[in-house]
Amino acid sequence: MLEQLQLLGRGGLQAIGGLGRAHLLLAGMLLGLPQMLARPRLLLAQVFNVGVLSMLIIGVSGLFVGMVLGLQGFYVLSQFGAAQSLGVMVGASLVRELGPVVTALLVAGRAGSALTAEIGLMKATEQLSGLEMMAVDPVKRILTPRLFGGLIAMPLLAAIFSAVGVLGGWFVGVGLLGVDDGAYWSQIQAKIDFDEDVVNGVIKSIVFGFVVTWIALFQGYDATPTSEGVSRATTRTVVHSALAVLALDFVLTALMFGN
Amino acid sequence: MGRRRPHTTLPGRIPGRERASGVTTGTPGPGGQAEPRPAAPRDPANGDPMRRAPILRSPVAPDATPLVRIRGLRFARGDRPIFNGVDLDIHRGQVTAIMGPSGTGKTTLLKLISGQLRPDAGTVEVDGQNVHRLGRGDLYRLRTRMGMLFQSGALLTDLSVFDNVAYPLREHTRLSESMIRKLVLMKLEAVGLRGARDLMPSALSGGMARRVALARAVALDPLMILYDEPFTGQDPISMGVLVTLIRQLNDASGLSSIVVSHDVRETAAIADRLYLIANGKIMAQGTPDEIEATTSPWVHQFMHGEPDGPVHFHYPAPPLTQDFLGPSTATPGDPR
């Protein structure tokens, strides 16, 4: 019993310590913003790494998610004689929820784990210490551009995901199941509000981009510098990011769309 | 400069400097005090007196004020003490070697000197500045005057050899790209890798990576260079060149060098002063000749690589027979 209490206490202290280190790292990364703005190429390179290199998986996933939404939506809506509203159902689902959330989960799996492994290996191979010894702050030089790269790339990827998803829903609904083409697009145009739906979706994806990249960078920077340590850190990145995205999605949805 | 060449007395050695140094040795155990030992050790292979490869040392007398001054250094990793009240001076213009068995904290000492680690107690002063009381800006300013050659090389893997060497120049100077190119090629030429400038670090052997790292470490013409195991993984030719290069760089550029190494012969050949550390303290210090002349069993065993002596090869363990034939054959962690 006492041992379990000790374990619980130790775990709690470690969690609080980790949270403190994560916030200190975040402060360090934010302080590196002016330095990063002086070298925009560093940022562009990370937008490319996180964003452009994730486009294929985002596009393909968005297409299939949109097609499934089109299929399921058609069967449900047709029971109520509302199949012509398929466009708004697919569009709203993607723009409000699935676009930001699924994109964040995919980015956590692809780019987040890659960021953790990259930073963890840089630590294990003394590259971060090497930068320190060259009087270059690795947090500002290496981590800050990655944080803002993720922050910028996530809403762009979410927009691509949603756009491709709407096309996937159109392909199934209009192309295969006979929903009227004009009704599909006009319903989207009429019912999806820019401020209510699109802007809120963009805000969500910005928050998710920030959190996922922060978790990925912290896990890499805080990893035990061994192959096992980097492996564990990569796993933690995906798990923590997924949980954080889903929990934050609930909070943000309640704040944005609750009464 | 072959490391296996027959040896003579070291040319260029300044007798006054040697006399002024004075060897001190300690013995393992509490309060092991310095005690001069006159007799020269003999090579266990052939019984000849041990000598080193002849390397020219510059006739530059060390400055009276040490560049690095360590006093009362205490440092522990968890419950395991690494340093227990170490006092150590690194003099300007000299090559100082830190030697000792594996796991005695040689690399840790370099990290403490460069401010990468913080001691539990004691002070580390570099060029009169207490490293661990400096703010980040001042520490970074100090580090621009330090070069460090990491054991792994620590090259940035996403940059080519050229860009790795150019990195500190681009970060800390406003030199034109054409000037940077010339400087980088000069540094790479010095380590024999000018032709490898376009290779990526993944295409380099461990020894080549360390030579590129050396070129990078001297790119800013630092005041002091810290070498962490510079000879590991070098083939005999590169080893000989590197040994000479470290000495020549030190003398030609007016540097001070701290070399951490296990390679007794090569390190002793270029060092002005040796520190042997073990058990959290300095076991012996002095010029290479003085260290060689000691008959301290610990120093003798270490310098000659003898398997038997005060330093045990085996990690502390119960007798083998007890493990094999004892009452319980279960190993720790065995669910049985």
Image (spheres, helix red, strand yellow):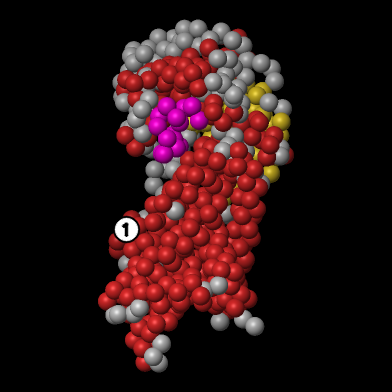
Q: Name the residue at 47% across, 44% down.
A: A45
Q: Is residue A258 visible?
A: yes
Looking at the rendered image, the quarter that the N terminus of chain B falls into is top left
The magenta region covers: B153-167
Q: Tag 1, which chain? A: B
* In the image, farthest residue toward the front: A182
Q: Mark 1 belongs to which amino acid?
A: Thr
Q: Nearer the viewer, residue A101 or B79?
A: A101
Residue B180: percent from left, percent from top: 50, 21
Identify residue for label 1.
B321
Q: Name the residue at 30% across, 80% down.
A: A178
Q: Nearer the viewer, residue B295 or A259?
A: A259
Q: Is residue A90 visible?
A: no
Left or right: B231, with B278 as reference point: left
Q: Name the residue at 61% across, 53% down.
A: A25
Q: Name the residue at 46% across, 63% down.
A: A158
Looking at the rendered image, the quarter that the C terminus of chain B falls into is bottom left
Q: Nearer the viewer, residue B28 or A61?
A: A61
Quadrant in the rendering for residue A12? bottom right
Residue B188: percent from left, percent from top: 42, 21
How packed mark 1 is, by other alpha carbons closer than 10 Å (few <14, some 14-19, many 20 or more), is few
Residue B312: percent from left, percent from top: 42, 43
